[in-house]
Amino acid sequence: MRHIISVLMENEAGALARVVGLFAQRGYNIESLNVAPTEDATLSRLTLVTKGEDKVIEQITKHLNKLIEVVKLVDLTEGEHIERELMMIKVRATGAQREEVKRTCDIFRGQIIDVTPTTYTIQVTGNEDKVNAFLDALSGATIMEVARTGVSGVARGDKSLSL
Amino acid sequence: MTQPASEPEMLSGGEMLIRSLKDQGVKYLYGYPGGAVLHIYDAIHKQSDVQHILVRHEQAATHMADAYARATGKAGVVLVTSGPGATNAITGIATAYMDSIPMVVITGQVMSHLIGGDAFQETDMMGLSRPVVKHNISVRDPKEIPNIVKKAFYIAESGRPGPVVIDVPKDMTMPNEKFPYEYPDRIKMRSYNPVKKGHSGQIRKAVSTLLQAKRPIIYTGGGVILGKASKELTHLAQQLNYPVTNTLMGLGAYPGTDRQFVGMLGMHGSYEANMTMHHADVILAIGARFDDRVTNNPAKFCPDATIIHIDIDPASISKIVTADIPIVGPVKPVLKEMLEQIDQAKIKVDEEALGLWWEQIDEWRQRHGGRYRTDDADRMKPQHVIETLCKVTRGDAYICSDVGQHQMFAAQYYQYNKPNRWINSGGLGTMGFGLPAAMGVQLNFPDADVVCVTGEGSIQMNIQELSTCKQYGLPVKILCLNNGYLGMVRQWQDMNYESRYSNSYMDSLPDFCALAESYGHVGIKIEHASELEAKLEEAMSIRDKAVFIDVLIDPDEHVYPMQVPGGAINDMFLSKTERT
Ligand SMILES: Cc1ncc(C[n+]2csc(CCOP(=O)(O)OP(=O)(O)O)c2C)c(N)n1
Ligand SMILES: [Mg+2]
């Protein structure tokens, strides 16, 4: 099953390497990963998407918790949660394609954030499925470049991952 | 401290490092100098509180520190230079890591501004050591050194212990840059808070299951020794009259000569231990991690058993075998609480079932209790050598083992009645561990009998340490079970490769006795069983010198029992011709 795990950790050099190293060393899979500082400059928040049987996920969260710099973590997929990913995609936009791409972009509520006579750069946000669906919908166009942030998320309601 | 608190002493980074060790109570530092750590070595020279032990290879420094930790429970300390010094230390760090041994390893590093530029003797020790340490810390500001040292010891020794590396760029130790020194009393970390006790509800469930058992067994590992809970374990087992088995790492936690002890379990475990495990209805696992050398095929592991698992590390629980009743916590307080609850419990042990269970266990014991072939009088049996060693040392020596058949014989045939006496590399299985380990123990227990049980293969992996032994006057006894082969490899080749001995025969062995003598030690050769006991007595009576005892043993001997690959825990070869 797919899990989204969010980790609060000390904002220290080497902490990220430890998380990534753990996954490599123990053969756990990472589908996506993002990390950035939080409102508290001493903490950064890392969110990763992984797939595995329950037993493997249990080991993953236990081993993450064992890392000395990890302060707290949550498996967002255990409860109601909101997930978002941002994608920027640069496509060839000439001739009939130009209109077609724009229409698809509108349907997905994407934004064109950069324009040249021959290209569009589009930004879409949404959960992983939506972002994937947009990519599929553009399969007729010439995709020049894709940049995705990976999934980030928070729990719904009052629950929060904080100290 | 002589200085008033308002006026802290001014020390350089190098001096702070050594002073912090002193204030941490460190007596010995095991190491080897080099460019990146010369400021630190100069700081060592200017004081006499922390004594530096100069080894002949950095790996030996790590094993000495490691063995000190295994014998005392306190972190051993290592100091090595950058680059090759650090890489030479890696094997020893990994050895400690696999067996959860507390250790603090200080490695030199090139100047901060040179890091990343492939400078002379630069190696990324933070990256290199990451998978084999509990934690590592790079010093970025000399002022932080006392705090970092305190933190390193705290992390190494608390929770599930393990090695911690402190990487120190040379510019952090400049002799002319001084900083106010103060050693912290304690460390608090928001991201690291090891558990202090077990969950009482879980303990209650465990006690009730345990008391209703009809065919119980207590299976304990290195965690009982690390957690200093040998007394509580013994108390619990004897109160219940349940059988006890120890893992390779757990030997000595329960008295080896006691009737309730059924021996070591696992790959080379005793017949009765593996049989008792397999047929148990309740297994109380304490500080053990269901290693593949114990379980054999996990899918066939102990089919009837309800498993209670106590461990300080949640990641060890339900990793290989699912625990029915997990208890996360330090072993000692958990066992204490179990004992209290047992006292108050309304349910009592099922004496009748237990009587039948003991009958069954005793029958297994009768059938195959640690027997070995003794018909060939010409050839000395390694098992007999270890039994004789046990007799001569009254089962009270520190036995520091290398890795191979001799290690298994030393585990099977020496009876350990006390914890911290059996010192071996279980998890990593590091050949070359034995001699430096024995030296580390002897240095800290000068009056104790310390024996390195080794093979002619293993001893040559760190034989240069005979020189260190001489320099520090360490009277260790090296008992070499010399079979002329990498015996454990040969055994596998006999069993799985139709005796094709690919590279397991060692030609051109030295005359070990002459070699030891050239270092200034004593050499004693034993060629016949008839002279074994007297010569061992003689060797053990030498108090002021190291002794190399070269015992020529039967090269054909195999370690039995041996689990059948892919089988259940009780599927065993019992000799060259018998199988369960
Ligand atoms: C550093 C290292 N290299 C290789 C091995 C694999 N190995 C395990 S036992 C063994 C043979 C050990 O020979 P010896 O020390 O003579 O002991 P014996 O088995 O003959 O008693 C080998 C090569 C190991 N455990 N450690
Ligand atoms: Mg040998």
Image: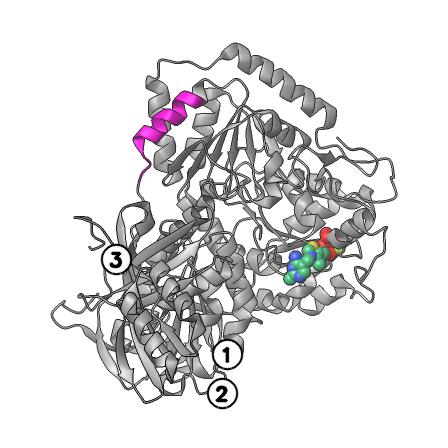
Relative image position of residue A163 (x, y in whole percent):
19, 55
The answer to whether the residue labelled 2 contacts the one labelled 1, judged by CB atoms less than 8 Å apart, is yes
Query: Which chain letter matches label 2?
Result: B
Q: What residue type is labelled 3?
A: Met
Given the current orientation, which residue lies at the most extreme top position? B352
Residue B236 occupies quadrant: top left
Query: Which chain letter matches label 3?
Result: B
Say whether residue B50 is left or right of residue A111: right
Which residue is at 76% across, 34% downward?
B574
For the residues labelled 2 and 3, the Cα–Cα distance comes to 36 Å
Relative image position of residue B299 (x, y in whole percent):
60, 37
Query: Which chain letter matches label 1?
Result: B
Classify B81 as above or below B460.
below
Q: What stretch is highlighted in magenta?
A: B197-209
Q: Reading the chain from its start, which is encountered first: label 2 or label 1?
A: 1
Q: What residue type is labelled 2?
A: Phe
Discs 2 and 1 share one subunit: yes
Classify B285 as above or below A19.
above
Work out whether residue B129 or residue A161 is closer to the camera in this orientation and state it. Answer: A161
Crowding at mark 2 (Cα within 10 Å: few <14, some 14-19, many 20+) = few
For the residues labelled 2 and 1, the Cα–Cα distance comes to 8 Å
Classify B342 as above or below B297.
above
For the residues labelled 1 and 3, the Cα–Cα distance comes to 31 Å
In magenta stretch: residue B176: no
Residue B521 occupies quadrant: bottom right
Mark 2 CB in 8 Å range of ligand 1? Answer: no
